[in-house]
Amino acid sequence: MPSTPANMFHALRRQVHREFRKPLIVFSPKRMLKMRAAMCALNQLDEGTRFRRYIPDKTVTAGENIERLVVCSGQVYYDLVAAKEKMKNNEGEESGHKIAIARMEQLSPFPFDLFIENIQDYPNLKSIVWAQEEPMNQGAWFYTSKRIESSLKHLNYPNDIRSPIYAGRDVSAATATGDKKIHDAELAQLIEDALNLRRTTHSYLEKYTQTNNGRHAKEEEEEEGPMATQATN
């Protein structure tokens, strides 16, 4: 999912110049066609430039201050950056300076080398988040989460990070809600999940866990009721 015109150009150029032939699948929304934040300079198309499989957060000046790495792909990157900048501009809000946002421009093959290299830039990292706009069962979460776990296992990261946190929409049979208010609310929720340093799990997992615990407790009460009556008799 190229997030800049330059990376889209280089992806197509690389496809043509490769000595072997394999399918190229690109997901790109119409929204970024006129997005000013998604524009790039002409020198990014110049000689010596190439397709970037993974783009780390270049705004980070002190890697030791970063506590959370948010990894995403596609247009949601620009929503996350806008929210992060708003946090940094708020007086007394320090969490914005503790978050790095990276872009996974190539999903497959997974850029293990660049991802692992980026993690090592943040010695005090406490959590890694995968953020996506799609529902949990439709985006890249199930693909990327296992590869992020493999990277952490290979690196033997000292800060006890074993798996990424999910930030995105709930599971759904439909690709979209069809209601702008619900869409905006879901987007705000996934941004909150991604950038809130106090959140260590995704909201939908908490919802399902609480629901299941309540359901199981009710089932146990129903099962124990007749048994208790029989035992009394």
Image: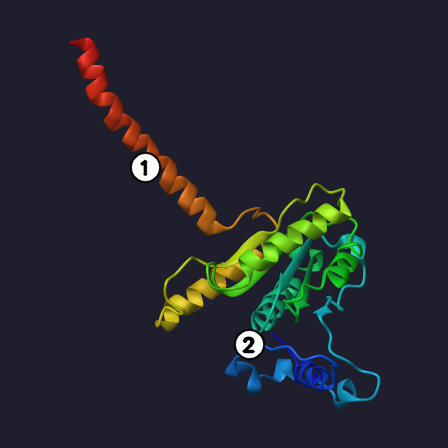
Which corner quadrant of the image does residue 65 belong to? Answer: bottom right
- Residue type (three-letter) at the residue carrying disc 1: Arg
Q: Is residue 151 left or right of residue 230?
A: right
Q: Are marks 2 and 1 in contact (CB under 8 Å)?
A: no
Residue highlighted by disc 1:
215
Q: Is residue 65 left or right of residue 137?
A: right
Q: Position of residue 127 (x, y in %)?
A: 66, 49
Residue highlighted by disc 2:
27
Label 2 and label 1: CA atoms lie apart by 40 Å
In the image shown, does 63 or 52 lie closer to the viewer? 52
Q: Against 195, is 89 above or below?
A: below
Badge 2: how crowded within 10 Å, few (<14), some, or many (20+)? few
Total numbered badges shown on the rendered structure = 2
- Residue type (three-letter) at the residue carrying disc 2: Phe
In the image shown, does 24 or 47 lie closer to the viewer? 24
Kindly identify the residue that appears in the image at 46 percent across and 47 percent down.
205
Q: Against 15, is 142 above or below?
A: above
Q: Position of residue 110 (x, y in %)?
A: 67, 63
Badge 1: how crowded within 10 Å, few (<14), some, or many (20+)? few
Q: Position of residue 112 (x, y in %)?
A: 73, 60
Q: Against 164, is 134 above or below?
A: below
User: From this viewpoint, which residue is outermost toward the front?
Assistant: 20
User: From this viewpoint, which residue is outermost toward the right?
Assistant: 48
Q: Position of residue 1 (x, y in %)?
A: 60, 74
Which is nearer the N-term, disc 2 or disc 1?
A: 2
Quadrant position of the C terminus in the picture: top left
* Disc 1 secondary structure class: helix
**Residue 217 is at least partly visible in this image:** yes
Kindly identify the residue that appears in the image at 32 percent across and 37 percent down.
215
In the image shown, does 114 or 19 lie closer to the viewer? 19
Q: Is residue 204 left or right of residue 95?
A: left
